[in-house]
Image (cartoon, helix red, strand yellow):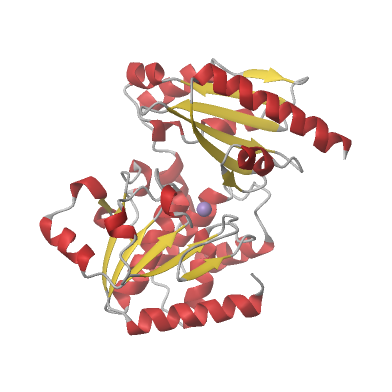
Amino acid sequence: MNSDHLNESFEQLKQVIDSKKRFIISSHINPDGDSIGSEIAFYNLLKNLGKDVLVINSSMTPDNCLFLEGANEILEYPQLRADEIEFIKKTDVLVLLDVSEYKRVGLPSKILEPKSLFTVCIDHHILSHPSMNLSIIKEDACATGEIIFKFMKYAGCKITMNIAEAIYVSILTDTGSFQYSNTTAESHLIAAELLSMGINHSYIYEKYYCNQPMKKAKLFISVISTLQTECDGKIAWMKMTKDMLALTDTRTEDSEGIINFAMNIKGVRVILFFKELTDERIKVSLRSRKKFNVRNVAASFGGGGHNNASGILLKGILDEVIQKILKRVEEELKKQECS
Ligand SMILES: [Mn+2]
C-alpha cells in the first residue's frame, strides 16, 4: 500500500468512525503485545471520541500486558455477560487488528459475519485476498500499532499517555526490542516521539519482559532440552508437548519468547518450534535470520506470516509433522542457497 493509497484508506476509516456509533474490536487467537497494544490504542481512540466500544478476544489477555491502562476492560469471548451479548447484536463496525483472516480471530460467526456489520481490518501481515469492507494492510509496517499511530496523526486524534504506552508496546514487542529485520528508521522515529511525549520505556520493558512466573522458566527448560540442529547447524528446532504443559502447569501462551533463545545460536538460519495443542493440532512457529524466507515454507502448508516470521497450524502427530516440515525446510534451504 503506497502513501496515497494509505491516506485514501485513512480517510475512509475516519469517515466510518465519524458516522458510526458502536464498535467491536478484536484481534487474533493468543494475542501478543502488538494485538493488545493495538487494541488498547484503538479502544481509547474511539472512547475519546465518545463511541461505544467493546474489545472482545477469543483468548485471555497475557498477564504481562495487564499493566496497560484499559487492558482490564478487554473481554474474553466465552465469558460475556448478557448485556455484552446484546451489544454485539447492535454493533455497527467490527475492527480487526493485527489479523486479516476471520479464521485466525477465533470468534463465532454471529459476531464476525452479520451482513449489516461494516468490517475493517488494520494489519501488517501479508494477505492477498482480504475480505473486509475496508482493509488497511501495510506490509512494511513493523507492527499494527505503527499503522494506528499513523492513522491517529492523519486524523488529528489526541495521543493520550495510555495510547502512547500501548503503541510503544506494539512496536517494542513486534520488533523484538528493535532487533528484527522489520525494524526501520520509522519504528525508531515513532518510538522517539512516544518517548518525547513522556512514556517511561524502562518501566514498560520491565513490566512486559521481567514479569515471568517461575513455572514459565520450568517450561522453558523442558522445551530447550529438546533443541536439535540439522543441516550443519543451519536449522534449529524444538518441540513442546502437552505433557510438558501439564507437568509445569502452564499454557501454550507461556511458550512465547522461547523461540528467541534458539535464534541466538551462532550459525542458525532457520528456527522451528513445534507445539502440540490440546485439540490434536500442531502449531509450528518459523523464524529465520537474514534472507531466508520462511513464508514460502509456511504457505506450502496453508500457513502465512512474514518473510522472517511465519506460522502453520495443522492436524497430525507431532513427530510426523516435525519430519515433514524439516524435510521441506531442508529443500527450501538448498533451493534458496543455490539461487
Ligand atoms: Mn503484529
Q: Residue 81: x, y in percent?
A: 13, 54
Task: Decide if residue 97 is on the left or right side of residue 1.
Answer: left
Residue ranking furthest to the right: 338
Please tell me which residue is depicted at 40% across the width and 31% down the height of the picture.
Answer: 252
As rendered, which of 265 and 1 lies closer to the eye? Answer: 1
Q: Is residue 333 above or below residue 20?
A: above
Quadrant where the N terminus is found in the figure: bottom right
Residue ranking furthest to the front: 115
As rendered, which of 9 and 328 lies closer to the eye? Answer: 328
Task: Decide if residue 38 is on the left or right side of residue 272.
Answer: left
Q: Residue 275: x, y in percent?
A: 48, 27
Q: Residue 217: x, y in percent?
A: 43, 24
As rendered, which of 220 and 309 lies closer to the eye? Answer: 309
Residue 3 occupies quadrant: bottom right
Please tell me which residue is depicted at 21% across the width and 70% down the height of the picture.
Answer: 90
Please tell me which residue is depicted at 81% across the width and 38% down the height of the picture.
Answer: 336
Quadrant where the C terminus is found in the figure: top right
Please state the total of marks drawn on the protein image. 0
Q: Residue 240: x, y in percent?
A: 47, 22
Please tell me which residue is depicted at 36% across the width and 29% down the height of the picture.
Answer: 279
Q: Is residue 266 visible?
A: no
Residue 236 occupies quadrant: top right
Q: Is residue 322 visible?
A: yes
Residue 44 occupies quadrant: bottom left
As rendered, which of 7 and 209 lies closer to the eye? Answer: 7
